[in-house]
Image: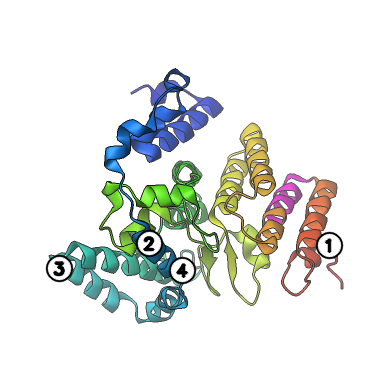
Amino acid sequence: MFENKVEGPAREILLEKLYTLRSYGWRCILFSDQVSNFRLSKFNSYVTPHTFRVNKVEKILHSNLFMFANSYMCIIAMKGVFLLKRGIQQIVSSDNSSIKHFILYYMSMFCSSLAQTIPLVSSSSNNKYQYRQYTFCLTLMLRNIYHDAVSGWLMLASCFYKTKQYDKALHVIVYAISKCSPEKLYRPRDMVDIHHQLLKMKALQNKNIAYLCKILFVDFIDFDGKCELIPDELTSERINGVYFAYSRPYAYFLKWLCHYHLNHVRQCQNSLKDLERVIGEQFFIADFNEIANAYNMIGIALQLSGDTELARQAFLQSVNSFPYHEFNPAYKRLFPNS
């Protein structure tokens, strides 16, 4: 009710904090100093031991079959609208909530893959055609938020960014970042105590793996070969035609790009600091390749800002983190003629 009374950077910080508090539900009261003596034991009635189920969830998340099934959605996306309509019919007609969750999960991945094949801008198309393509892509993006907690929202933000709707993109990005909370799971991270405690809660018991992925899992951002949603600034970063990144570094980079195009100097600086902090904490970054990828994002941002020397240092940091020239685009930026 007071959101519109706060302007500028303070409004953005307020929104991010409110989204974060909302994502924690009743647990947000633990952030208050006034409840420092709060006893979790009062809520023990809501938590029961369920070790077998926790181990089963972890086994499924790391199974090759589960990852293969997810990858297969990129292939069947080529069948297009027919499967989309068929999936919607299955969701509507099914009375089983578990089946609905699984259909929603794979429909979400399917919509994400299908949306990447739609040309949003074409010089040979009239405005009516472009608008029809955009609305179809937007429809798919709104249906691609059910396979994890974050990446679907960032794909939607990418759609807004590519169509120069930077303010809308920023709203979605702030919400997506708020979902990157410490209890989230991502590959190849192993489950730790906080995940075990969450899965033991009665509210999450008897929930299938598709539902758990929607609220607990953070997937990669994955742009396929001819994807129209990848920011222009990242097209040269593709390896063998594909670009992927962990969601949190990508979110801060996309946030920086939006502020850059809106000429928000201070917000650009803050977004760059946030991206540097993600690298330092290695939060939602699991390997050296992705640390290098995050340094590349910083280098690209600095290049666009005109700070070529600092950009060069960022690319050197990338090379030091992942010294494989065939898999690290930083080499081409440092040695363009080699």
Q: What amino acid type should be assigned to the residue bearing mark 3?
A: Ser
Quadrant in the picture for the C terminus: bottom right
- Magenta stretch? 296-306
Residue placed under numbered mark 4 in the picture: 116
Give the image location of residue 204, x and y in percent.
30, 51
Q: Label 3, label 2: how many angstroms apart (C-alpha)? A: 19 Å
Residue placed under numbered mark 2 in the picture: 147
Mark 1 / mark 2, whichever is N-terminal = 2
Crowd around label 1: few <14 · some 14–19 · many ≥20 (10 Å)? some
Label 1 sits on a secondary structure element that is helix
Task: Please name the residue shown 46% across and 68% down the image.
Answer: 116
- Give the overall secondary structure of the magenta segment: helix
Q: Label 1, label 4: how many angstroms apart (C-alpha)? A: 30 Å
Task: Please name the residue shown 76% across and 51% down the image.
Answer: 303
Crowd around label 4: few <14 · some 14–19 · many ≥20 (10 Å)? many
Q: Is residue 87 visible?
A: yes
Give the image location of residue 140, x and y in percent.
35, 63
Residue placed under numbered mark 1 in the picture: 334
Q: Label 1, label 3: how many angstroms apart (C-alpha)? A: 55 Å
Residue placed under numbered mark 3 in the picture: 94
